[in-house]
Amino acid sequence: MLKVELTENYAGVTIYGDYNDLDYLYDAIYQFIKEEANSLGEYMMQNHIYGFLYEVRHAYQGDRDVILVDNNLQDSKRQWHGIKKKDVTEHNMYFSFNYLLPDIFLDMMIIRDFMGNVDKKVNDLYNPYINMVNYFYSLVLHSLEEFLTKIKFNKIKKGLLESVVIESMFIPQWFEIISVDYAKMTKKQREKEFMHIMDAIYNYRDYEDYLKMKIDMEKLCKEKHCSLDDLHYENYPEEIEW
């Protein structure tokens, strides 16, 4: 079963499950972003999701962390099913990885935008990919319940539902700065600044600094004859206090 837990220092979430859990999460999200992008903004939005899927794939390939989970297979059950003790263990191995909170919420906003473009005949109650993505969203949200007050928690849920990512307005550098800064914070700083950071993600279009950055970045691209997607700020720190 797929699990999502808030990390100890509020940096992000630990996402874990067995091979099939993570493989299916990958497939479910991929269904909504696999088509060729129609614009640079859409292409950059897809790239951000591919960054998350990269981590999911490497996790279920065993390239990240593993967690041993008690499988509750009692000797009486094992014997009743005729399974030899040497053929089983007391634990199942789950694959896991950590992912920063600002990045996961931006990803969820973008994925929801792509999901909204799905044909209505496909986008229904019984679509297994949509249900998987929504289940994942609920796991991420509810991992924050002990971290936030009820009022703040409801604001986060409401913001995710109402936020809009517009491809013609999207520049990844704004969100890169937010995530890198958040990664460098202490636990107390994250607890204090989390709601402000989420507002800067949900309501990015309302920030004059965002609009100015977009103009400046586009100007710089013309000068350097490059794409917005080629410009990056400093990298994420090598060590994060998860």
Image (cartoon, rainbow, N blue to C red):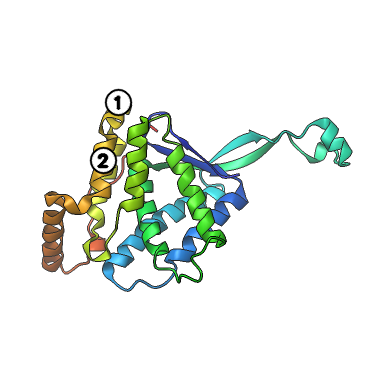
Question: Considering the numbered disc 1 on the image, is that residue within a helix, a strand or a loop?
Answer: helix
Instruction: Return the residue nearer the eye: 174 or 156.
Output: 156
Q: State whether residue 136 appears in this view.
A: yes
Left or right of 175: which side holds 103? right
Query: 241 above or below 221?
Result: above
Query: 45 above or below 161?
Result: below
Instruction: Return the residue nearer the eye: 55 or 102.
Output: 102
Q: Position of residue 85 (x, y in %)?
A: 83, 35
Q: Which mark is residue 197?
A: 2
The residue that disc 1 covers is 188
Q: State whether residue 239 appears in this view.
A: no
Query: 68 above or below 46?
Result: above
Q: Residues within 10 Å of mark 1 (few under 14, many from 20)?
A: few
Residue type at numbered disc 1: Lys
Q: Position of residue 184 (x, y in %)?
A: 28, 35
Question: Considering the numbered disc 2 on the image, is that residue within a helix, a strand or a loop?
Answer: helix
Q: Residue at x 34, y 41 (%)?
A: 156
Q: Which mark is residue 180?
A: none
Q: CA distance from mark 2 to mark 1?
A: 14 Å
Left or right of 86: which side holds 68? left
Residue type at numbered disc 2: Ile
Q: Residue at x 77, y 39 (%)?
A: 88
Q: Nearer the viewer, mark 2 or mark 1?
A: 2
Q: Residues within 10 Å of mark 2 (few under 14, many from 20)?
A: some
Dots 2 and 1: beta carbons under 8 Å? Answer: no
Q: Residue at x 42, y 29 (%)?
A: 146
Query: Residue 23 is drawn in which quadrant?
Result: bottom right
Q: Position of residue 91 (x, y in %)?
A: 69, 35
Which of marks 1 and 2 precedes in the sequence? 1
Q: Position of residue 34 (x, y in %)?
A: 44, 68
Q: Looking at the rendering, in which quadrant would you find the C terminus?
A: top left
